[in-house]
Amino acid sequence: MFTKLSGITLVCFLISGFITPGSTSALAAKRMSQHDNVHMFIQISALLSILTTSIIAGTVFAYANSVMPGLRKGEDQTFVLAVRQLNSSVNNPIFLLVSNGALVAQIVFISLTIYTQDTHQIIWCSLALGAYIATLLITFMGNLPLNKEIIDAEIPQEDKGWEPLRTKFESRWTKLNLLRTITCILSVVFLLFSMPF
């Protein structure tokens, strides 16, 4: 009987040695630190998502609001040559870095919100990511093929050759750009709603 009680006492002593107020506080502090780190990464990814997506939204909005309306007033040759130069210059490493960076930042953002199981942020992040993916799909499946086609087209030898190039490009490209402007702006709006204030 004494041996049995001694064994129980020893077990209780060992348990009390591991579970002390100090160790409990340390565990709570560690969990709090992990929570703070996750929250910090969420804020960073949210800000990067908004920044990069806003840059892309501003770029396509500028085309829809000023560039294309301005070119519309020009002659066919002026329009085609200007579009060729503009679209060639946009395809640069910085723009590709920002556009791809926006996608990566949004994926990281939504992954962290799923990890924290924040339903509010998950919903808005999902909408934002969906709208931005739609923007990329419109760009890669619509605008970029039209860009390549007009850039690779042979320079017309006669004045009447410019008009078909312009007609084939202008209307469709403008409509696609307007559509991706809307989806990209919506993505920014959804990101703002998802911000962890």
Image (cartoon, grey):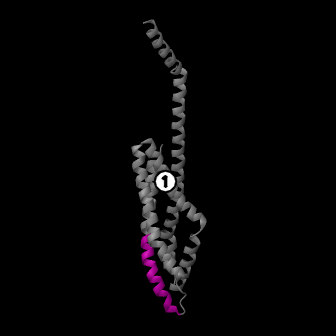
Residue 150 image offset from top left, x and y in percent: 51, 80
Residue found at the very far bottom of the displayed protein: 158
| Magenta region, residue range | 158-176
As drawn, 143 above or below 110: below
Q: Quadrant of the N terminus?
A: top left
- x 50%, y 85%: residue: 76
Residue 122 image offset from top left, x and y in percent: 41, 48
As drawn, 177 above or below 168: above
**Label 1 Cα neighbours within 10 Å, binned few <14 / some 14-19 / many ≥20:** many
Secondary structure predominantly adopted by residues drawn in magenta: helix
Of residue 79 and residue 43, the one placed in the foreground of this image is 43
Residue 160 image offset from top left, x and y in percent: 49, 92
**What residue sits right under mark 1 in the picture?**
106
The image quadrant of residue 134 is: bottom left
Of residue 60 and residue 115, the one placed in the foreground of this image is 115
Q: Secondary structure at mark 1?
A: helix
- x 44%, y 56%: residue: 129
Q: Is residue 194 magenta?
A: no
